[in-house]
Amino acid sequence: MARNSALVFFSALVREPRRVGAIGPSGPNLGRVMAREVDLSRPGLVVELGGGTGSITRALLLNGISDDRLLVVEREADLYQHLCEKFPSVRVIRGDALELGKILEAQKCSGVNAVVSGIPLLNFPESVRLAFLHEAFAQMDEEGVFIQFTYGLTCPVPKKLLQNAGFQARPVNVVWLNFPPATVWRFSRI
């Protein structure tokens, strides 16, 4: 029987607050906004990083991503187990999203369409955030997009760093009906 998502989340939060990076699980409104940014007409794998309790996973599936086109990465053991129970037909991998290239290689995955991230980027130094973007974009073709939410109102990677690295970002929406409110950003190559 699947465990209660909120209980699983708060248990992980108490053990590792900085690694979880949020004070509450992402809600369905945030998931819907993020899922709408994935171009379903483009072939390829959609990778979700930091699957948490599965609200974004569920939104991606409800938006039309088939189970076999979705790969979810989660580092925390209890959240990983919860995702496996909640979405038995989706490939869920326990691993560190900062090692995306190694994870995809081990899974023999290629042809990534989009990366959707719930990783708490603001908990990392700017250099790690930028390296994380490079790693994600290295897995995608030229049209690939990186969708990230943050609890800040500004871009989680400073615009000057993005431009120098050949990326751009634009805010998609502020999701006021999430607790706490979150801003969704869409990153692409320049």
Image (cartoon, rainbow, N blue to C red):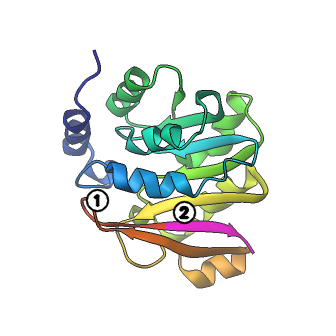
Secondary structure mostly seen in magenta is strand
Mark closer to the observer (2, 1): 1
Residue labelled with disc 2 = 128
The quadrant in which the N terminus is found is top left
Q: Position of residue 150 (x, y in %)?
A: 40, 65
Q: Which one is in front, 38 or 118?
A: 38
Q: Quadrant of residue 102?
A: top right
**CA gap, disc 2 and disc 1:** 26 Å
Q: Is residue 188 magenta?
A: yes
Q: Residue at x 27, y 45 (%)?
A: 16
Q: Position of residue 170 (x, y in %)?
A: 57, 75
In the rendered view, would you say 60 is above or below 140? above
Q: Position of residue 47 (x, y in %)?
A: 60, 43
Q: Residue furthest right?
A: 142
Q: Position of residue 164 (x, y in %)?
A: 70, 80
Magenta-highlighted residues: 185-190
Left or right of 137: which side holds 170? Answer: left
Residue labelled with disc 1 = 178
Q: Earlier in the sequence, mark 2 or mark 1?
A: 2
Any mark on residue 13, and which?
Answer: none
Q: Are marks 2 and 1 in contact (CB under 8 Å)?
A: no
Amino acid under disc 2 = Val
Q: Residues within 10 Å of mark 1 (few under 14, many from 20)?
A: some
Amino acid under disc 1 = Asn
Total of numbered circles in the picture?
Answer: 2
Q: Is residue 12 magenta?
A: no
Secondary structure under the numbered disc 1 in the rendered image: loop
Q: Which one is in front, 125 or 148?
A: 148
